[in-house]
Image (cartoon, grey):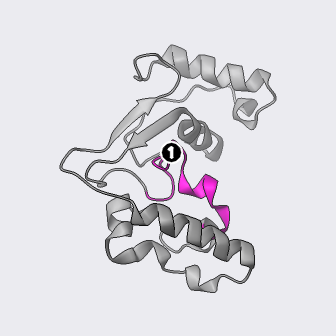
Amino acid sequence: MNATDRQLFRASTVVILGEGTKASFWQSSWVQGQAPMDLFPDPFKLAWRKNKTVKEEVQNQNWIRGLWRMQTVTEMANFVKLWDIVQEVQFNDQPDSITWKWTEHGEYTAKSAYNARHTVSSMGSPFGRRNRTTRKTAVGTG
């Protein structure tokens, strides 16, 4: 899966945190349907560990490692916004779940992925640059 496919996957899914053991802290769309890497690109660039789960990063505030290199007011403002979001995270004993935005029932279908790719392609989005449909993957891998 290339960067375009991962971006389309993030834009097409909503992750609901449960245990936080499957969703990727930076790359899964667990913050109001968006991934922290898309909402806060400055902290993401500075972060050291970009493939850890939400639980791994939230425990002991591990997600802030590397962010001490912030140099601009914008970077610091984004850090504070993300900090506030992270403080509200509450885990439960359910597995993380994922909902596909392109179907009424929230489940992935190849047809809906094809339609999504070609719909955004017709709008001039970078998602349409490749002529390949995305496939459903496990939470945290996309």
Q: Is residue 141 above or below residue 117?
A: below
Residue 105 magenta-highlighted: no
Residue 127 horizontal side relative to residue 139, left or right: right
**Which residue is rendered at x = 58% and y = 57% of the image?**
37
> Residue 93 location, x and y as percent?
18, 49
Q: Is residue 68 above or below residue 37?
A: below
Amino acid type indicated by mark 1? Gln
**Which residue is rendered at x = 45% and y = 48% of the image?**
30
- Magenta span main SS: loop
> Residue 125 location, x and y as percent?
76, 33
| Residue 109: quarter of image | top left
**Closer to us: 32 or 58:** 32
Residue 74 horizontal side relative to residue 94, left or right: right
Residue 103 horizontal side relative to residue 118, left or right: left
Residue 103 horizontal side relative to residue 73, left or right: left
> Residue 84 location, x and y as percent?
49, 66
Residue furthest out toward the left:
93
Q: Which SS class for mark 1?
A: loop
**Which residue is rendered at x = 53% and y = 22% of the image?**
102
Q: Which residues are magenta?
A: 25-43
Instruction: Name the image quarter holding the N terminus.
Output: top right
The residue at which mark 1 appears reads as 32
**Which residue is rendered at x = 48% and y = 18% of the image?**
103
| Residue 24: quarter of image | bottom left
